[in-house]
Image (cartoon, rainbow, N blue to C red):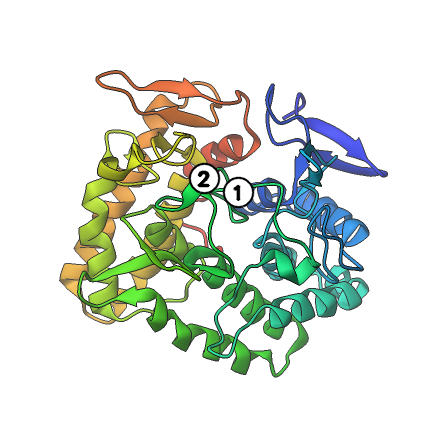
Amino acid sequence: MERLKTEYRGFTLYNAGLPGFPRNFTRDGIISAILSRDSRMLENQLNFCTYEQGVTKNPNNGEEPGKISHEYPEVTIGKLSTKFSACDTTALFLIGHKFYIDLTGDKSLAEYQQKSIKNAIKYILSHLNQDNLFMEDPKFCDGKRFATKTTYWKDSEIINRKNGEPVYPICYLLAHIQNMCGMRCAAKILNSKYFRIAEKMKKSIEKLFNPTSDNFYIAVDKKGPIEAVSSDFLHMLFYLEPGDLKNKQLEGIIENSKKIETKLGYRTLEPELSGKTKSEYHTKTVWPFEQAIINNGAIKHRLWVERHGFAGLAKSLRYVEEVSSRVISRLDTDPEIFVLGNPKTEKGGCDPQLWTIAAKKYFKKFRYHHFI
């Protein structure tokens, strides 16, 4: 942690990882603070988010009013900057505020940043289409492209699209769920009408589900659905409340996840499709931080189905808990990813990686705590 500690604009923050990402990422900072239940880290990250929050439209860096930045200092790719190249950071800003209140009991930070919170809500509302799906499109910032090929956490590329880029507009399932959760958190902070918006967003999840395959779509863009078995489906349980999904949908997620099960946890994409991308970064890998996210989501939903008498489903969720905790055995250091090979699996990416450190703290101390 000391190697990753830095200071930007007077705030003590943490860079994402060394040697590859010696910069602060909102996504990494907030998720790491949540997993490690570190109120000080979270407070500093939220303060920095407010300082860097978008105020105008900028096609060169993806900025929009109310949008929370992705990366600082920004990186230039071609003529575009990565500074605001993320559609989930604004939701995480709202989620982080609610978690901070739950963790500390202190509402003063949210009160002080109420204007920023309301601007973040406006950003999310501006991205909802007529079906209340959260849409992503560079047109929102008056641009034609983003610096990264996709703008949720798996931002290297997306399958089954030319050059790994979506045909905009696009709705990413996980980003939609995160922004719905963000709206719920904002409504609880402000005790406001936004619960109704979140409820409409919940109902729209059905439009991202294929009843024929009992599987969700990774995303739906202008060209149509993008379907595969992805870790996104287990990942999203962390942000959903028990009861948001039908039991049949939850059972389908767990059954399909057998395709991505490995000796180290859940891989990011089913192996049959991982060769269809140029990059293996988000397709042929197991991410330690994601195993912690999946583990806690499974615990949350398992406790709920046990209380409601669904013994078979509870047993399946216990199995998800077990699979996602397998990564612990290989975390003698703090690797960003494990790259799945045949037959050997190797550590990859940064080491140390901030949210891997947070995942280790989660599994050691906090796995049965309430998070979101």
Determine crowd level at label 2: few under 14, some 14-19, many 20+ residues with C-alpha closer than 10 A. few
Q: Amino acid at mark 2?
A: Asn
Q: Nearer the viewer, residue 284 or 182?
A: 284
Label 2: which residue? 163
Residue 308 percent coordinates (x, y): 24, 72
Residue 304 percent coordinates (x, y): 31, 65
Q: Quadrant of the N terminus?
A: top right
Q: On the picture, is 114 further left or further right than 270?
A: right
Q: Residue at x 51, y 61 (%)?
A: 169
Q: Residue at x 33, y 58 (%)?
A: 217
Q: Residue at x 30, y 66 (%)?
A: 209
Q: On the picture, is 343 further left or further right than 338?
A: left
Q: Is residue 312 above or below residue 271?
A: below
Q: Quadrant of residue 64?
A: bottom right
Q: Nearer the viewer, residue 286 or 370?
A: 286
Whether residues under marks 2 and 1 lie with C-beta atoms below 8 angstroms apart, the answer is: yes
Viewer can see residue 244: no
Disc 1 secondary structure class:
loop
Determine crowd level at label 1: few under 14, some 14-19, many 20+ residues with C-alpha closer than 10 A. some
Return the mark for residue 149. 1
Q: Amino acid at mark 1?
A: Lys
Disc 2 secondary structure class:
helix
